[in-house]
C-alpha cells in the first residue's frame, strides 16, 4: 500500500456539483494546476475516487 498520493487538479470546477467542489476543497486543492500530497487512508481514497475525472494522481512511497 502506498504511503501517500500526490494529487493535482487538472480540470476546472466549472459545471461540477457543489458536492464535488467541496470534496476538491477538502483535499486541499483550490486552483487548477494546484498540487498537494495527501496520506493514503480510506477517507482520502474515497474522496479521490469521487472526483477522479478532475485529478491526476501519482503514488508516492
Image: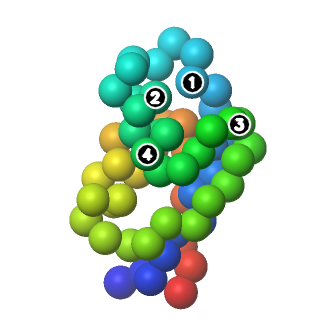
Colour mode of the rendering: rainbow
Disc nearer the start of the sequence (4/2): 2
Question: Is label 4 in contact with label 3 (beta carbons under 8 Å)?
Answer: no
Question: What is the tally of numbered marks visible in this picture?
Answer: 4
Position of residue 27 relative to residue 40, above or below, is: above
Q: Percent from the top left, x then y, of residue 52?
A: 45, 44
Q: Residue at x 53, y 87 (%)?
A: 61
The one nearer the camera, 58 or 18, is 18
Disc nearer the start of the sequence (1/4): 1
- The mark found on residue 21 in the picture is 2
Mark 3 element type: loop
Mark 2 element type: helix
Position of residue 37 relative to residue 52, above or below, is: below
Disc nearer the start of the sequence (3/2): 2
**How far is disc 4 from disc 2 in space, using C-alphas?**
9 Å
Residue beneath disc 1 = 13
Location of the N terminus by quadrant is bottom left
Mark 1 element type: loop
Q: In this view, does 6 lie to the left or right of 39?
A: right
Residue beneath disc 3 = 32
**How far is disc 1 from disc 3 in space, using C-alphas?**
9 Å
Disc nearer the start of the sequence (1/3): 1
Pick out the residue farthest to the top.
15
Q: Percent from the top left, x then y, of residue 17?
A: 39, 18
Q: Residue at x 71, y 36 (%)?
A: 32
Q: Residue at x 44, y 83 (%)?
A: 3
Residue beneath disc 4 = 26
Label 2 CA crowd tier, 10 Å (few <14, some 14–19, many 20+): some
Amino acid at each position: 500500500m502506498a504511503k501517500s498520493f500526490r494529487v493535482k487538479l487538472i480540470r476546472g470546477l466549472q459545471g461540477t456539483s457543489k458536492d464535488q467542489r467541496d470534496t476538491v476543497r477538502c483535499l486541499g486543492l483550490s486552483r487548477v494546476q494546484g498540487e498537494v500530497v495527501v496520506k493514503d487512508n480510506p477517507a482520502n481514497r474515497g474522496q479521490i475516487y469521487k472526483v477522479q475525472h478532475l485529478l491526476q494522481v501519482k503514488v508516492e512511497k
